[in-house]
Image (cartoon, grey):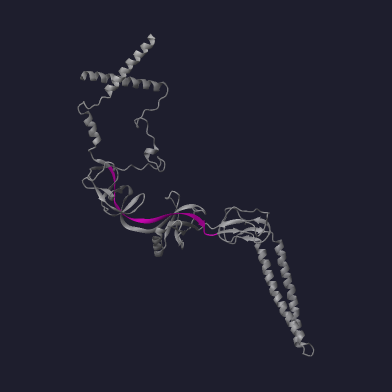
């Protein structure tokens, strides 16, 4: 029991000392001469405001419309057999570039060759019969009416006409047999690129089968995309004036895949979406576009010539509209109302309010107001081409040391415990010193 009382008394004493130390250390410094006033002065920030600035400039600014579309082959053909038979050979490789008339596959021609030979033989037989009938008709014509009856002559003349018509039918049968024989050689109908073949050598194919291979024309290639109906008027005006340039962009909206031209605008607007379809053709020389690929389309409809351009971050918006801070000659800023004719993520076209000889603030608007004095800083330097990764600044490419960042290096084990004990002792010493200082002041 006595031991417990001693522990309670000890804890009470320690707690009292700690409370006294906290009270002394937490006393406001207002009583100290000039303590709080100096801090308030630092926070007031009466000096010039640091900002970054950029000059307004005169430039030609293109006006683009953006849409989302899909690349599509200009021509797509599924090559199917036109006759039945066994495939003797496949004469193309998957993914091969083929020309119109190239041999793709060969079907066994034996049956169709026999049909052609039969048609040729039938024609020869009919030719012999026609020649004999013509000679008989000539002999009948030389005889008198008393020797041969007129009916016999007319019958012979009809036989000659019948055999002549039979020869024409034989010619048609021969042409038909030749066509079927030609179908045994499957040729490429267009220039294009072959896909994955659907049948292998040795298989029996029929005219009703799915096909042998699909050929797509990828050079040139088309892109179908849509634009809002509100932009249709400007597109039609640009197309009437001449060729309209279209760029195919990557999914990031910046990388240009290919340059093409607008070919056609659909003849009606989709009422469900309020958009209109358009088609542009691209040469696709490097095969950057592929059928079925989703791409972004950028249509050049106009170019604003010799207009005033400022960086987009310089454009501010307030209750009275858009404005910008213009730097005057005495290193102050003037809040200038402006009108923005066109704006994108990097630059804005100013219709009125700023001239090309002025500079505008692009960064540092927190403490800025009309008439504030400013100091113009230098923009960050670009990273070296070989020392930093692409798209990263020097600060993100090189990690600063813990000392440079004002941080302690990580410690583990005994070192960490020694540092914590030292800090605890230092804090206790500071508390005792404050307490003594307070006693002396009193």
Query: Is residue 306 toward the left or the right of residue 72 in the image?
Result: left
User: In which quadrant of the rendered image does the N terminus lie?
Assistant: top left
Residue 381 horizontal/vertical position (percent):
34, 42
| Main SS of residues in magenta | strand
118 shown above or below 422: below
Residue 374 horizontal/vertical position (percent):
24, 42
Query: Is residue 8 toward the left or the right of residue 33 in the image?
Result: right
150 shown above or below 337: below
Residue 299 horizontal/vertical position (percent):
41, 57
- Any magenta on residue 134? no
Q: Residue 100 occupies which quadrant of the picture?
A: bottom right
Query: Is residue 289 toward the left or the right of residue 211 in the image?
Result: left
User: In which quadrant of the rendered image does the C terminus lie?
Assistant: top left
Q: Residue at x 68, y 72 (%)?
A: 171
Q: Residue at x 66, y 56 (%)?
A: 89
Question: Magenta part of the protein: which range?
Answer: 51-75
- Which residue is more in the foreground, 222 or 337? 337
């Amino acid at each position: 029991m006595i031991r417990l009382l001693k522990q309670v008394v000890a804890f009470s004493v320690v707690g009292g000392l700690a409370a006294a130390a906290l009270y002394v250390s937490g006393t406001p410094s207002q009583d100290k001469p000039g303590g709080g006033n100096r801090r308030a002065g630092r926070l007031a920030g009466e000096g010039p405001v640091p900002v970054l600035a950029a000059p307004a400039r005169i430039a030609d600014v293109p006006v683009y419309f953006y849409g989302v579309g899909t690349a599509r082959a200009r021509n797509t053909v599924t090559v199917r057999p036109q006759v039945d038979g066994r495939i003797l050979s496949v004469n193309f490789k998957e993914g091969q570039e083929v020309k119109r008339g190239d041999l793709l596959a060969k079907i066994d021609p034996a049956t169709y060759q026999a049909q052609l030979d039969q048609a040729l033989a039938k024609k020869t037989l009919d030719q012999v019969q026609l020649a004999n009938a013509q000679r008989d008709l000539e002999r009948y014509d030389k005889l008198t009416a008393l020797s041969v009856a007129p009916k016999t002559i007319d019958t012979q003349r009809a036989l000659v006409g019948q055999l002549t018509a039979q020869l024409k039918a034989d010619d048609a049968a021969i042409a038909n047999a030749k066509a079927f024989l030609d179908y045994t050689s499957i040729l490429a109908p267009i220039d294009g690129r072959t896909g994955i073949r659907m049948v292998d050598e040795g298989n029996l194919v029929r005219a009703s089968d799915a096909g042998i291979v699909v050929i797509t024309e990828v050079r040139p290639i088309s892109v179908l995309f849509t634009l809002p109906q509100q932009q249709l008027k400007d597109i039609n005006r640009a197309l009437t004036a001449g060729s309209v340039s279209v760029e195919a962009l990557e999914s990031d909206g910046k990388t240009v895949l290919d340059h093409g031209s607008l070919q056609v605008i659909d003849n009606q607007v989709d009422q469900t979406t309020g958009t209109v379809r358009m088609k542009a053709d691209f040469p696709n020389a490097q095969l950057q576009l592929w059928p079925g690929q989703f791409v972004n389309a950028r249509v050049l409809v106009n170019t604003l010539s010799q207009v005033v351009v400022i960086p987009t971050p310089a454009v501010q918006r307030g209750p009275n509209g858009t404005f910008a801070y213009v730097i005057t000659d005495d290193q102050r800023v003037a809040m200038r109302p402006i009108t923005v004719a066109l704006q994108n993520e990097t630059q804005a076209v100013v219709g009125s309010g700023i001239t090309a000889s002025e500079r505008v603030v692009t960064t540092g608007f927190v403490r800025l107001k009309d008439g504030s004095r400013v100091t113009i800083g230098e923009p960050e330097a670009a990273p070296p081409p070989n020392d930093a990764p692409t798209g990263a600044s020097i600060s993100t490419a090189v990690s600063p040391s813990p000392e440079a960042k004002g941080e302690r290096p990580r410690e583990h084990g005994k070192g960490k415990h020694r540092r914590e004990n030292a800090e605890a002792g230092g804090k206790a010493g500071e508390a005792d010193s404050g307490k003594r200082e307070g006693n002396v002041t009193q």
